[in-house]
Structures are given as C-alpha cells and as structure tokens.
C-alpha cells in the first residue's frame, strides 16, 4: 500500500516547484501514478510511506499543447489517450496514435502521461522510440533565485539507462517537445507476450514521407526500443533509404541493416529476428498511412540498392 503524510495538488508551476524544492527527502512527484502505484504495491517495493507526494496534474503550465516553429510543445500532463482522441495531435505526430493504441488499456491511457513514461526510463517503455523518431527533447524546469530556469535535453541524452535519467533533484519535466511531422505516415510495432495490456519486449516507431511522385523515400525516421538500455535511432538505415526508390527489396535490406544494430544482451537472436520483421512492417505500414494518394511498393529486385 502507498501512503504519505501530505498530498499536494499545486495549481501553478512556481507553486509546484517551490513545494518540490522544499519537500522532505524521499518525497515523490506524481502524474498519472500508473508506475508509482504498481511500484508501491505489496510484493514489489512493499508497503511504502512517503513524506509528501506532489501531484502535478493541475498545473496549467504543464497542460495542453501548441505548435511553434515546426515543433510541437506537449505539456507534461499530456496523456496517451490524447494521441488517439485529438485530431490535430494525430496529424502533427503521426506515429503516436499507433503507439497509443497498443499502450495499456482505455483506463490507463486516460491518466498515463508521456512524460511519466520517459521519467520512468524503462528500457521497454513504448513512448521512447516515437519520441526519438520525432527528434524529441525533454523540457526540465527548476527555480533559480525564485525564477523559472529551463533546459532542453534530447530524449537520447535524457535517458541514461534503466530507471535513470538526467532529471536533477530540484527539476520537474514541464514539456516534451517534438517535430511537427504533418504529412508523414506513421507506424508503431510492438512485440510482447500478448497483444493488449502488455509491456513490450521490443518496439519500433517509424515516420515516412515520400517525394511528390510517390516513388521515392524523401524522409524516413526509425527508432527502436527494448533492444538496449536506451532508445536507438537508426540513422544509418534512414540515410540508406533517403532518396531510394520504394520497393520491397529496399525495405528488406533496410530491415537487415537495422537488425545488425541490435545490441541487447538478452535474447539477442530472438530480438534480431523480431527487429527484421517489425522494421519492415513499420516502414510498410507508415507508407500505407501517409496522407494523400496510396503509395505503391514495387516488387523485390525492381529498384535500386539502398
Ligand atoms: C496496467 C498497466 C499497463 C501498462 N502498460 C504500459 C504499456 O503498454 N507501455 C508502457 O510503456 N508502459 C505501460 N505501463 C506503465 C505506465 O503506465 C507508463 O510508464 C506511464 O506512462 C507512466 O506515466 P504516469 O503519468 O502514470 O507516471 P507516474 O506513475 O505518475 O510517475 C512515473 C515516474 O515519473 C515521475 N514523474 C511523473 N511526472 C513527472 C514530471 N512531470 N516531472 C518529473 N517527474 C515526473 C514520477 O515521480 C515517477 O518516478 C503500464 C502500467 C500499468 C499499471
């Protein structure tokens, strides 16, 4: 069971940061509590009593989203359900709905935040590959001489390893900032023990944009989760396909190249096979999901090497 001496619900960012900086050692920030509650369940961490919990879900500066200069600023309180139910977010971040649909279940999605998912820093978190594919940065805010001090950290640097992040003791994640990928097709592939309510064994996010003729890759973003301690952005695969003609052969070669990057120590061979299968599936699905005219994938051997 999880108990605490004081449960705070600040209604402003300065108030939240003040409470956080003054909280006794051992206190915790909380958003949706979908990681904190299972952690505190008897049998894992045992009964847990905290001096204070600071619930940030009512902080307006951490809520909502806006687009500025080609980047989407998602307040840290954005929950997974938003990626399914908000049409503009579906358009700006085309891989996120495919991630959200496989994330937990309806109830958890209503409260689980993307920010909490990143801070939890599980190697198999579903949120990290799409955020990496969208060139995501984590906005961290603290109080310095009573004023708000912000810094931005790319997600690949924010996650240091399993359960470890670059978040300083006095900081709160206030936003996740991502590329506006309007016009791209998106996909998310997840492999686990079963299809729903499952934590991934490995996962893959893809974003694809074709050229005006619809026959060549103009841009491609690929990231993997669950194959190492941090999300892996497959930049060499992206570069190999950029400008290449769209064919099953080119995609198959790209999937093989992706598998050669797999660095997980456990179940390496299994995951290698998984990576080949779902990198291919992710690219093909993202092509199929690109807005506009359907993209034809030509047969193996018909087009140029990657
Ligand atoms: C039934 C179930 C199914 C699940 N399925 C999946 C799944 O399919 N895929 C998956 O990846 N995960 C899954 N999870 C894990 C969990 O839902 C996610 O990691 C979730 O996104 C965490 O967000 P939260 O808002 O609930 O975080 P919380 O539990 O509130 O917090 C998680 C951590 O982040 C910290 N934190 C929260 N917000 C902030 C902030 N703004 N600034 C700084 N620190 C902060 C907290 O102190 C805590 O350490 C599942 C969990 C459950 C219970």
Image: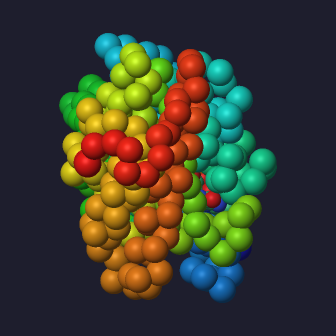
Does 252 sit left or right of 63 as displayed?
left
Q: Quadrant of the N terminus?
A: bottom right
| Position above or below: 88 against 35 | above
Q: Which quadrant of the view contains residue 180? A: top left
Colouring scheme applied when the structure was drawn: rainbow
**Nearer-the-camera pick, 96 or 108:** 96
Does 86 sit left or right of 77 as displayed?
right
Query: Where is residue 142 drawn, in percent x and y?
Result: 30, 38
Can see residue 30? no
| Position above or below: 71 against 132 | above
Does 113 sit left or right of 223 as displayed?
right
Count numbered badges in the picture: 0
| Position above or below: 37 against 249 | below
Q: Going by the picture, which residue comes out furthest to the front?
A: 302
Query: Where is residue 235 drawn, in percent x and y?
Result: 24, 48
| Position above or below: 208 against 204 | above
Q: Residue, x 61% and y 43% (percent of image)? A: 98
Q: Quadrant holding ligand 1?
A: bottom right
**Nearer-the-camera pick, 228 or 166:** 228
Query: Where is residue 189 drawn, in percent x and y?
Result: 55, 55
**Nearer-the-camera pick, 210 or 165:** 210
Does 201 sit left or right of 271 as displayed?
right
Q: Residue, x 78% and y 49% (percent of image)? A: 107
Q: Residue, x 49% and y 39% (percent of image)? A: 297
Query: Where is residue 154 drawn, in percent x and y?
Result: 26, 43
Q: Going by the picture, which residue comes out furthest to the right?
A: 107
Can see residue 248? yes
């Amino acid at each position: 069971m999880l108990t605490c001496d004081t449960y705070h619900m600040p209604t402003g960012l300065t108030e939240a940061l003040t409470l956080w900086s003054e909280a006794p050692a051992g206190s915790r920030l909380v958003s949706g509590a979908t990681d904190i509650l299972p952690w505190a369940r008897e049998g894992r961490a045992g009964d847990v009593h905290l001096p204070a919990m600071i619930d940030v879900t009512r902080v307006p500066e951490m809520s909502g989203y806006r687009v500025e200069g080609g980047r989407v600023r998602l307040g840290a309180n954005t929950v997974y359900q938003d990626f399914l139910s908000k049409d503009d977010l579906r358009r700006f971040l085309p891989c996120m709905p495919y991630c959200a649909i496989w994330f937990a279940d309806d109830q958890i999605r209503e409260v689980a935040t993307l920010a909490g998912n990143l801070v939890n820093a599980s190697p198999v978190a579903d949120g990290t590959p799409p955020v990496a594919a969208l060139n995501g940065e984590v906005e961290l805010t603290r109080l310095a001489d009573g004023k708000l001090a912000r810094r931005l950290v790319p997600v690949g640097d924010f996650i240091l390893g399993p359960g470890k992040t670059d978040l300083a003791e006095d900081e709160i994640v206030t936003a996740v900032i991502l590329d506006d990928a309007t016009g791209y097709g998106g996909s998310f592939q997840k492999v686990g023990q079963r299809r729903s309510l499952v934590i991934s064994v490995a996962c893959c996010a893809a974003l694809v944009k074709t050229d005006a003729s619809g026959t060549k890759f103009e841009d491609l973003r690929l990231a993997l989760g669950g194959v190492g301690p941090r999300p892996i952005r497959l930049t060499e695969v992206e570069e190999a396909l950029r400008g290449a003609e769209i064919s099953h052969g080119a995609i198959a070669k790209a999937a093989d190249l992706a598998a050669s990057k797999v660095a997980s120590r456990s179940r390496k061979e299994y995951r290698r096979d998984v990576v080949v299968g779902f990198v291919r599936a992710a690219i093909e699905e993202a092509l199929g999901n690109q807005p506009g005219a359907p993209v034809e994938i030509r047969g193996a051997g018909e087009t140029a090497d990657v």
